[in-house]
Structures are given as structure tokens and as C-alpha cells.
Image (cartoon, grey):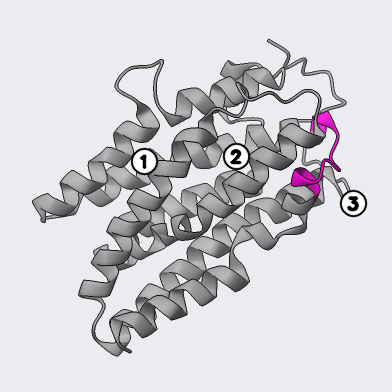
Amino acid sequence: MTADELEAALREIGRVRYHANHPFHALLHAGKLDKGQVQAWALNRYCYQAAIPRKDAALIARCEDPALRRAWRRRLVDHDGSDAEDGGLARWLTLAEGLQLDPEAVRRQNLALPATRFACEAYVRFVAERSLLEAVASSLTELFAPEIISERVAGMLRNYDFISEATLAYFNARLTQAPRDSSDALAYVRCHARAPAEQQAVLDALTFKCDVLWAMLDALYHAYVIPGHIPPGAFDPAGPDGLAP
């Protein structure tokens, strides 16, 4: 494939397989979930947020190109911040607190669904163990993030009286960070994926990442929507855990 054809194939994977198409997101954005279900989403999604800087550090550790390391380390600052009060992780805990969850309970991740934790760890291991080209390509779900973020913020503000703009502040920064990061990653993939095997590996990496995100929502839907089977030890909105801060 030419670079343009490869990019088109990547974007087609996102069109079909990105988790924006999952029915859980349709319910979330349309205001069809109750507060406990939204809490479960925020608590579980934190596991993914916490995995992102770990996988980015793993990528940087095996990268010999200073230019790529410079570009990629911005992602660490974006999520970890320059101190404990800044960055995406801190803003996600603010979101959790705005939903009346205990931020420390969310940070510990032990109440997240087993499938959530397995999926996030699989992503970190993929980036650490596969080729650098595959690791970079797996981040390309960010190509599709701005649209879902805009839809999420508008829908949740419109449909949930327990959501405020301050609660969703995490997403404001991502509207500029995600396009910047995906542009860098896409340029790298277009330049370095030349041979057919390399191009197929890139397509498979993006498919894998879409599967990770989809599996997390499958687990949420199964536990908190239909049939509502919450695994032992996982967050139960009707349980005695008392996660309110």
C-alpha cells in the first residue's frame, strides 16, 4: 500500500471497530444510565487512564530515536502532570469525586472489574513486548477520540443533573492533546510501515487496541446493564462499600 492507502485502511478500522460504536456509550451519552452505572464507568475507566503513562514509559524506554522520545514524553506529562495536582490522572480523579466516588478507592483500582484490569494490562504488555512500530500504531485510536469526546461532553451535560462542566474538565485538554499526539504517531507509521508485513502489523495493532477498548465496555455492559452480573469484589452501586468521599 501507499502511505495514503495505509492511512485509509487505518481509518476504516476506526470507523468500524472504535468503541464509539459500542451500545454502552450510546446509553451513556443519551442519559440512559443511572448514577451508579455512570460511577461504574468512571471507576473502571480510571484503570485505563492509569495504564496510559505506564505504556508510554515502556515505549520511551525502548526507543532509540531522540525525536520520537521528545514527542512521546509529552504524553507522560499530559497524564502524570508536573506535580500531583496536575495532569490527566488528577483530572480523572476530580471527575470521580464529582460523581461522589472516593478518589482513593478509585486510585487503588481493586474495585474495578477483572476484565477491565486484564484488558489494561494486556495493552501495557503489548506496547512493551511488540515492535516499536506496532507500539506506536496501537495509539492511533486517538485519531477518533475528538469526536467521541465532543459527543460525550455535550450529551452528559445535557442529560445528567449530577454532571457539571467542572466534573468533565479532563476532556477539555484531550480535545487538543489527542489530535497532536495522533498526528505524530500517524506520521511515524506512514514513514516506517513500508513492507507488506509491516503494514499488516500496523493494522493488526490498531485492531488490537480497538479490541481492548471494546472489551472494557463489554465488561461494563455485562456487569452493570444486561444481565447485571457484578463479579465478586467489584464495585456495586447498591452495595455497602460507601464510596462517597
**Dividing the image into 4 quarters, which one contains the N terminus?**
bottom left
Three-letter amino acid code at disc 3?
Pro
Q: Position of residue 80 (x, y in %)?
A: 36, 29
Disc 3 is placed on an element classified as loop
Instruction: Determine which of the numbered discs, if any, sits on residue 45 in the image.
Output: 2
Residue type marked 1 = Arg
The numbered disc on residue 227 is: 3
The quadrant holding residue 238 is top right
Q: Nearer the viewer, residue 139 or 118?
A: 139
Q: In the image, what residue type sits under mark 2?
A: Arg
Q: CA distance from mark 1 to mark 2?
A: 15 Å
Where residue 138 appears, as percent x and y from the top left, is 40, 62
Residue 107 visible to an observer of this rendering: no
**Residue 237, quarter of the rendered image:** top right
Indicate the secondary structure of the residue bearing disc 1. helix
Give the residues drawn in magenta, as a range. Answer: 27-36
Which is nearer the N-term, disc 2 or disc 3? 2
Residue 177 lies, in percent from the top left, at 39, 43
Classify mark 1: residues with Cα within 10 Å, few (<14), some (14-19) or many (20+).
Answer: some
Q: Residues within 10 Å of mark 3 (few under 14, many from 20)?
A: few
Asked if residue 203 can be seen in this view, the reply is: yes
1 or 2: mark nearer the eye: 2
Name the quarter where the C terminus is drawn.
top right
Residue 54: give its label: 1
Check contact, mark 1 vs mark 3: CB within 8 A.
no
